[in-house]
Image: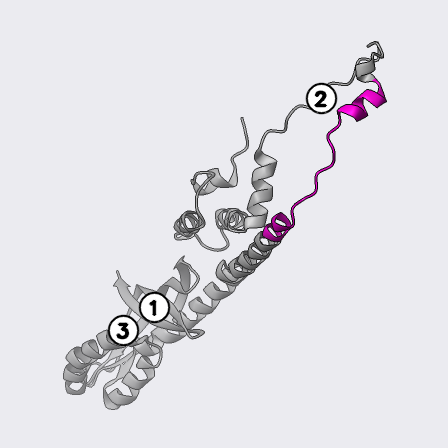
Amino acid sequence: MSTPSWYDLLDVDPDASTAEIRAAWKAAVADLDPTDRRFRAYSQAAEVLLDPARRAAYDAERRPHPEADPEPDPRQDASPAHLPEAAAARAPAPRTVPGWLLTVVGVLAALAVATAAWLWFVVPADSEVEDATRAARAAAETAVVPILSYDAAELDASREAATSYLTSGYREEYERFFEGVMEKNAPRTGTVVETSVLRSGVVRSGEDRVEVFVLLDQATTNARRAQPSTIKYWVTVTMERLDGEWLVAGLKTRA
């Protein structure tokens, strides 16, 4: 049984385009944690197949090698056809490589180097993805506390603390929720909500978008209840990297 190739691993044809290979790689690692060994295998396959020079060398290795010419029979008669003089007479004259061909080869080589350099910055290394995932997870743990906490006596400060961690798109959704629920009910009931993080884990990772699962402990008090009522629940926090900063782009509550 032959060993699966990088093409087999990414489930693409050997003549697949760069776009097809990149799409297959992203789909393969979408649900994997960067520490998963399958993530590393898929990324290694993409690094080879998205680099024109490395892909060409890899394809050359995969091609079957022609069998070597059989050794000459020492018992064969030394007929004129086998003499060095005859062989030299039959040998074609050396050809001169045209100058235009050398120019084309040079241009193609320069393009290959430029493409490889571009791919170096476009396709992240395993370590870069792992670092980004850790940063997004830490940012999610920090952001979720002010987003899900508030004090009826200091609502403006509570809102300002939360919105600083939000993308512009999600900030609009949060503002609607804040105005519709907190501003209407909290002052009347004197509610104070304090949230803390118990633990977290990465659900899905990517270059600039990471989903983090966070287990929260939330204590609520109000004018009628001095003793805090505490609940635990999970939230899925979608983190998005904008201008080098990880911000909350979405938040879903789970029982």
Residue 229 visible? The answer is: no
181 left or right of 61 in image: left
Q: Name the residue under label 3.
A: 169
Residue at the spot 52% in from the left edge and 63% down from the top edge: 121
Coordinates of residue 125 in the picture (x, y in percent) = 54, 58
Say what secondary structure mark 3 lies in.
Answer: helix
Q: Which of marks 3 and 2 is nearer the N terminus?
A: 2
Residue at the spot 50% in from the left edge and 49% down from the top edge: 46
Specify the principal SS of the magenta part: helix
- Kindly report which numbered mark, 3 or 2, lies closer to the viewer in this rendering: 2
Residue at the spot 74% in from the left edge and 33% down from the top edge: 93
Q: Mark 2: which amino acid?
A: Asp
C-alpha separation, residue under disc 1 versus residue under disc 3: 24 Å
Coordinates of residue 89 in the picture (x, y in percent) = 79, 24
Q: In this view, does 109 lie above or below 173?
A: above
Residue 16 visible? The answer is: yes
- Would you say the residues marked 3 and 2 are in contact, meaning their CB atoms lie under 8 Å apart? no
Q: Is residue 224 magenta?
A: no
Q: Mark 1: which amino acid?
A: Leu
Q: Mark 3: which amino acid?
A: Gly
Which stretch did the figure color magenta?
83-105
Q: Judge the density around disc 3: few (<14), some (14-19), many (≥20) Cα neighbours within 10 Å.
A: few
Disc assigned to residue 216: 1
C-alpha separation, residue under disc 2 versus residue under disc 1: 72 Å
